[in-house]
Image (cartoon, coloured by chain):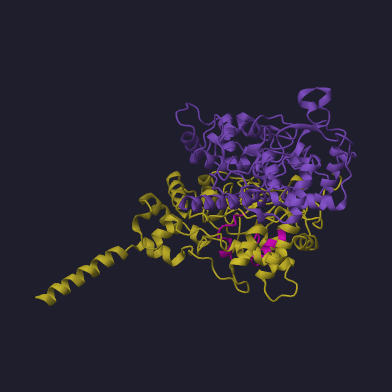
Chain colours: A yellow, B purple
Amino acid sequence: MKKTTLLCAAIGLAVTTSTAIADPLRDRAAALFSPIPTEAPEIKGNKLTDEKVELGKMLFFEPRLSSSHLISCNTCHNVGMGGHDYLPVSIGHGWQKGPRNSPTVFNAVFNAAQFWDGRAADLAEQAKGPVQAGVEMSSTPERVVATLKSMPDYVERFTASFPGETDPVSFDNMALAIEAFEATLITPNSRFDQYLLGKADAMSNEEKEGLALFMDKGCAACHSGVNFGGQNYFPFGLVVRPGADILPVGDKGRFAVTNTASDEYVFRAAPLRNIELTAPYFHSGAVWDLEEAVAVMGTAQLGTELNEEQVKKITAFLRTLTGDIPEVVYPILPVSTPDTPRPVDMVDY
Amino acid sequence: MKKTTLLCAAIGLAVTTSTAIADPLRDRAAALFSPIPTEAPEIKGNKLTDEKVELGKMLFFEPRLSSSHLISCNTCHNVGMGGHDYLPVSIGHGWQKGPRNSPTVFNAVFNAAQFWDGRAADLAEQAKGPVQAGVEMSSTPERVVATLKSMPDYVERFTASFPGETDPVSFDNMALAIEAFEATLITPNSRFDQYLLGKADAMSNEEKEGLALFMDKGCAACHSGVNFGGQNYFPFGLVVRPGADILPVGDKGRFAVTNTASDEYVFRAAPLRNIELTAPYFHSGAVWDLEEAVAVMGTAQLGTELNEEQVKKITAFLRTLTGDIPEVVYPILPVSTPDTPRPVDMVDY
């Protein structure tokens, strides 16, 4: 009798557990997507230490990495604004406009490569780009190193962050420190991730229907993995090429990197994490409304005219990808010294 | 007998206490200067509540108060850079250069009036200036209100911060919230303040000699009170007018506010709190070295050629005025909506 009771109890438990687990939608999703981890990932060749992450944060907020002393990484990848700048394209040195929409820094560590055309292999390589780009921060490695070496606090911090190195204050180490900080800018615990990890009611029915459509209609073919994108390159306008307002003819995407005809208008699939925080959309930053962006994708990439209800549901699902925004305490940056290279365009003041 | 013992003990105590207190230098200093309080001061007509201070912080970091969506209060009054921008003059809308050096926001609440020429009575009035200045953020009250009303999170926060008001999202309330946040940006606990409050060894002998010189030579005539300045207006070049590199002839200071001949080249005495963090110096931002600035002041204002040792000691003293920098957690700003006025200069993107 006691055995039977126990057995029944065991079966009951098994049934309950299996009821909780049996969610074919979640199973399908789990095969395609992974949750954002709660801890910064390890980076090959760049050990994350507290010292290095803190130094990286200072450098991320450091406008003196730009020759004007005005523009920092955070100007265009604002940690209070979804990790970017809510602008179609960013404003850089001399009020020049950049050629493409600024991608979010949040979860960028999970992308296979950086920039819309994937021309940087990792965040450290990426960090060197805007610092030197004439249209962005317009500085040089020599100027950056001279700037950092002019402030004793930076010299100390580089020495502590890169122990044993004979010349720790270098342009490469600046990039590694920034990469280390950026690796901490991750957004776990979105409602989608909670659902994926077993909390069935973390998403509404409409949102779940949106998830099903996202997989059924083919969106997940390009937007999958931990970041819902950011892993591979695809032609924008795979089926129907959008108008020049959305896909300007002057920007041939990855073609500029590979010089291969088949890479014309090819871009890295945008990661969709926190997508509700990253308007305006596309490399052109031409579309402000997420529903409109979803509809454009349906036509351009899938050759499917998504109806209004489908667009609404997919968009509702996409809004479940917003995670916990990292808390960032503003760093205290050292004061300029008489040896700090003066801001350019300011010499006559 | 017992009485005598008690009396002796009492005398002993009095002697000890009076030994600890007897510091004529400190007594002189205490008559001229006050320590920065550890709590934000009360502001008449603007009660500081947690909701209002947090809203004010968001607005302080809000680049969408500028018509370009690039420039926030923090751009020129950077809380990680001594409360200003380490620039001679700031860069504003369209990469225009401002006419004067950006003053620090730290302890600005203790100034009698704001701006180098004192044209704003308080921080709330001040906050409205740069938002509208064509050379700074280049926006309008109407545009600001439309921007804030387009984001439900802001509407909620204004309603909570200004309870009972029928139209809480207003340009005036924006300014009051910013003032509330700025009132929290104070830097108590400098070594000088510790000394003033009784910690005799908080300053070195050289620094104390510098303090004595600062009072003896007449610096304290203009630079006194809680902020070591910021209270009154004086002609720059009271005794000897500095060269046009330091005092550009085109900027007649308070004359532009009062239209009174005697106010030509008159400026508000700069507050000297955290002065080691606020290079470059003067309204022109022309001098990067603090010792040089002290020497210029000696000649221009006091008609005294301070010798090298005196300059060194006064400068050493001034470095004791650096207090604890407030910790600021970066605020999370709401996402732009389809109703948010688009950034100007960006309409063709």
Work out whether B301 lies above or below A279. Answer: above
Which x, y percent locates residue A118?
65, 63
Quadrant containing the N terminus of chain A in the rendered view: bottom left
View extreme (left): residue: A1
Q: Is residue A304 left or right of residue A137?
A: left
Nearer the observer, A132 or B237? B237
Work out whether A178 lies above or below B67. Answer: below
Count of marks, rendered view = 0
Which x, y percent locates residue B331?
55, 47
Work out whether B85 lies above or below A236. Answer: above
Give, as a single range, the part of the protein colored magenta.
A103-129
Is residue B87 visible in the rendered image? The answer is: no
Is residue B50 visible in the rendered image? The answer is: yes
* Magenta segment includes A121: yes
Nearer the observer, B222 or A345? B222
Which x, y percent locates residue A47?
60, 72
Magenta stretch: dominant secondary structure: loop
Q: Is residue A278 left or right of residue B279?
A: left
Q: Is residue A28 left or right of residue A263?
A: left
Q: Residue at x 87, y 46 (%)?
A: B306
Quadrant containing the C terminus of chain A in the rendered view: top right
Which x, y percent locates residue A313?
43, 49
View extreme (front): residue: B1
* Magenta segment includes A297: no
Nearer the observer, A22 or A6? A6
Q: Residue at x 66, y 70 (%)?
A: A160
